[in-house]
Image (tube, helix red, strand yellow):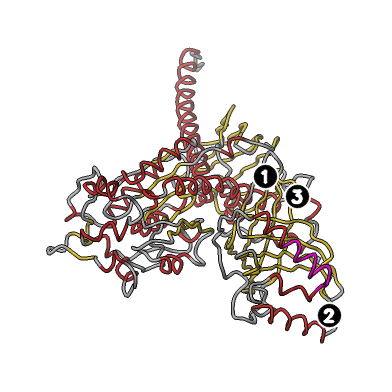
Amino acid sequence: MNRKFHPLIAIVLLSIFNIGYSNAQKKVEKEVLKASKNWISNFNKGNTVEVGKAYTTDAVMVAKPFGTFEGRKAISKFWTPFVKSGVTDLKYTNTKIKTVSETEAIISSNWSMNVGEGIITNETWVKTNGIWQLRKDHFEVIKQFKNNSKMNKKETYVLVHAAWLGAWQWESIVKTLKENGHTVLTPDLPGHGINKTSPVDITMDDYVETLIDIVDKQDSPVILVGHSFNGITISRVAELRPEKIKSLVYLTAFLLPNKGSFFNAVQGVKGSTAVDNFYLSEDKIYALVNEEEIQNAFAHDIPKEAFNGAKPYIVPEPFAPLTYELEITETNYGQIPKYYIECTEDRAIPIEIQRAMYNGNVLKAYSIKSSHTPNFSKPDKVANILNRIGSEQQLLKKTKTILYDLKYGRINAGYRPIFNNEDDDKLFSHYFSGNGETANLHRFFTNSNQVLAHIETEKDGRKYAEMILFNLDKNGNVDTFFPTIQEVPEQQIEGLTMFDGVKTLTVNPDTNQNKIFIEKFLNDVWIGGNINTIQDFFENGKVIQHNPMVGNNVEGLFKFMQNLQKQDVALQYQKVLATFAAGDMVMTYSKGLFAGEEHLFADLFRLENGKIAEHWDVIQKK
């Protein structure tokens, strides 16, 4: 029997098939586009954990000109330092999606970010167990931006008030920061200021959740500032939201270790008017300070009438948060740069206690001659320091970007030739944490056109000391730089390490004179060989020495030189190649001979009263 062909039926069936396919295709495109946008969002937020998790375990990424990275671990190792270096504002344009099947699709697109732009030729997404992940990621850098204003965008500050006070305490500081173009947020914690939460119900969790809610709403990481007791609070927030915190700033605040608490920290403290007059309400709901001693304890350096004007806004402090034991880890909280602003006239937290808390635990410390409330007595100084810290975030980004560029060969021709051998490469191959290696930036000093970094790293069980000086051009790009690296010996003569000592950069009007003084020291003593003048450069022959082979004081230096003579080993500086000076710190970078072989010498000096008081160095065989 002949069957009659019905074209209309065929067309209808084909249309139904196409509609079904089109709907399935649109569903895949929608899901893949959502997964891609989520990856971009995590990238721009600095959430490196989620960026890495988006790849399959066997994923392959081809990133021109950087190379090929196989497996999620290798890909994460590439992205983590790159994202942390300050790269952001990633955008896709002219995006096209090719649906391969219900579980596979390929994206091609143009991309741009604050450091460059390029193309994506194959971003393959696959769906496994209902989750879309990247299996292939092929992209290319077409153009790098040499000087990009987006890298110099203004900061967002979250200022957290002290116990008994409120957001109102920051009024004068907020004004200055906003005049400099920054965004400033000043929340009232529960039970303070305009927040009338009953103190009976308030815990540390309430303080922390208030701040987390704020930082989560910000498009980029913030500078989180904590005053006094709430140094503990910002530490906990940083632990829970490390990707949202750019830096932590402690304003004469409690900077405590894991399991530390306010009550443990103040036990046995001598010389604190606040501690001596501290008491609890009968129902143990509030913590208070004897009313007659409040100003003496916290604000002795502001006029009485000004204090009386603020007094009505002081509230009883909820007791429960004061009992909280801090929970932090090196993995989260420990990776965030920290600054401390000490107050030398503080009668609440004596200066000795402040220094005991921050010494060895911060990137940099600043000093103000003030009571416990410099926000009232010295608001301009506090604001200026916060502005400086904000400016340094860009330099921190730049330094990390440079180190990252060096590590992956993304280097301008102007400074690439310095790194041309295995010893030079190892200086940067383990700078970033997160890939089985650790790094600690002990000192980070800047002036108008230079950056100095003093770094401790550890790789394969071996520790290294590094000192790097960057000279910047007028656009903020690297002009020249001077690196040194030295393996840290297991033992040191004086029991100190190559990294101990003062990290505070004291503002010093005689900085240029200090620079001239140190250059004279090197030219007279180490280059000129005039050892008889060495005593002229030290106060009563005293100096704290961090060279692992040299003892303290001039006496230790002479013993070191005598030992070299006995071994017939010559130490000869030949030329100072670069000098850095900021505040009371001066660093020189020199070349010379040690035991007949060419070496590079990075020497960092701290001066007091115009004399050398402390010395660090890193010596590398050239």
- Marks 1/2: CA distance? 49 Å
Q: In the image, is 234 to the left or to the right of 126? A: left
Q: Secondary structure at mark 2?
A: loop
Going 77% across and 66% down the picture, which residue do you hit? 522
Can residue 244 be seen here?
no
Between residue 54 and residue 276, name the one nearer to us. Answer: 276
Can residue 565 be seen here?
yes
Q: Secondary structure at mark 3?
A: strand
Q: Which residue is mark 1?
A: 63
Between residue 263 and residue 349, name the one nearer to us. Answer: 349
Q: Which residue is mark 3?
A: 480
How many C-alpha atoms fall within 10 Å of the one at disc 2: few (<14), some, or many (≥20)? Answer: some
Labels 1 and 2: the sequence-earlier one? 1
Residue 529 vs 24, above or below: the answer is below
Q: Which residues are magenta?
A: 518-530
Residue 357 vs 123, above or below: the answer is below
x%, y% of residue 265? 34, 69
Amino acid type assigned to the residue bearing label 2 in the image? Val
Task: Give the quarter of the image for residue 333.
Answer: bottom left
Q: Residue furthest bottom?
A: 566
x%, y% of residue 5? 51, 14
Going 68% across and 81% down the picture, which residue do you hit? 556
Q: Magenta includes 190?
A: no
x%, y% of residue 476? 67, 42
Q: Residue furthest right?
A: 596
How many C-alpha atoms fall within 10 Å of the one at disc 1: few (<14), some, or many (≥20)? Answer: some
Q: In the image, is 395 to the left or to the right of 220? A: right
Q: Which residue is mark 2?
A: 569
- Marks 3/1: CA distance? 27 Å
Labels 3 and 2: the sequence-earlier one? 3
